[in-house]
Image: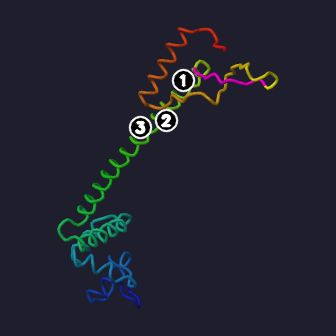
Amino acid sequence: MGGNSPCASCKLLRRRCAKDCVFAPYFPSDDPHKFAIVHKVFGASNVSKMLQELPVQQRADAVSSLVYEANARARDPVYGCVGAISYLQNQVCELQMQLAVAQAEILCIQMQQQEQQQQQQQAAALAPSLVQLEPDIDDDDDGDHKSYFLHPHHLLNFTSNNSSANVIYDSFKKESHLYPHDMVS
């Protein structure tokens, strides 16, 4: 910087900031904590050597990485970034497992719904043979004459997984083969 205000590193190290200061572009004076944490973890001379060995276009990324690693080391002195990465990888694995379980549950529900729809379609296709006959009293006569009409609202619901419903259905199916003619009283 070399002007009026020294960079954060030169301020912390209490030295004069030269025009060609390697720290000045990356550690501005308005953010002293950024250099302080990097200096505490890596040391100013090590950071200076690292930055001088790198091409100028890669230095900003290197400083960002050093600041990130230094902050991670401050939070977790033993593992640093590796601890954070490991923690996040474990979270990803757990979330992937939860996602797989949720997808499996969705698939099961969809299969159940498909099965129920198929059962309802089968029941609807078989419904005409399963309707009940209901007497309809002729009002014109004296009430002795009864005729039977098919009423769809009397259809039995065979879409349940109940075994007794299947038994009833089987018995109706067998009886319809025994008595193929319409029943009229």
Task: Choose mark 1 or mark 2, whichever is in front.
Answer: 1
Q: CA distance from mark 1 to mark 3?
A: 21 Å
Q: CA distance from mark 3 to mark 2?
A: 9 Å
Badge 1 element: helix
**Going from the N terminus, do you reach mark 1 or mark 2 first?**
2
Taking the spot 38% from the left edge, 47% from the top edge, the residue there is: 99
Q: For the residue carrying disc 2, how many other residues have a C-alpha within 10 Å: few (<14), some (14-19), or many (20+)?
A: few
Q: Amino acid at mark 3?
A: Cys
Q: Quadrant of residue 153?
A: top right
Taking the spot 36% from the left edge, 45% from the top edge, the residue there is: 101
* 94 over 180 or under it: above or below: below
Q: Quadrant of residue 17?
A: bottom left
* 133 over 9 or under it: above or below: above
Q: Which mark is residue 108?
A: 3
Q: Do the residues bearing badges 3 and 2 touch, measured as CB atoms within 8 Å?
A: no
Badge 3 element: helix
Q: Amino acid at mark 1?
A: Gln
Q: CA distance from mark 1 to mark 2?
A: 14 Å
Taking the spot 67% from the left edge, 22% from the top edge, the residue there is: 150
Measured from the top left, where is residue 136 in percent x and y?
A: 71, 24
Q: Quadrant of residue 16?
A: bottom left
Q: Which residue is mark 1?
A: 122
* 68 over 1 or under it: above or below: above
97 sits to left or right of 115: left
Residues 170 and 114: in front is 170
| Residue that protrudes farthest toward the right in the picture | 140
Q: Which residue is mark 2?
A: 113
Q: Which mark is residue 39?
A: none
Magenta stretch holds residue 94: no
* 30 over 163 or under it: above or below: below
Q: Do the residues bearing badges 1 and 3 touch, measured as CB atoms within 8 Å?
A: no
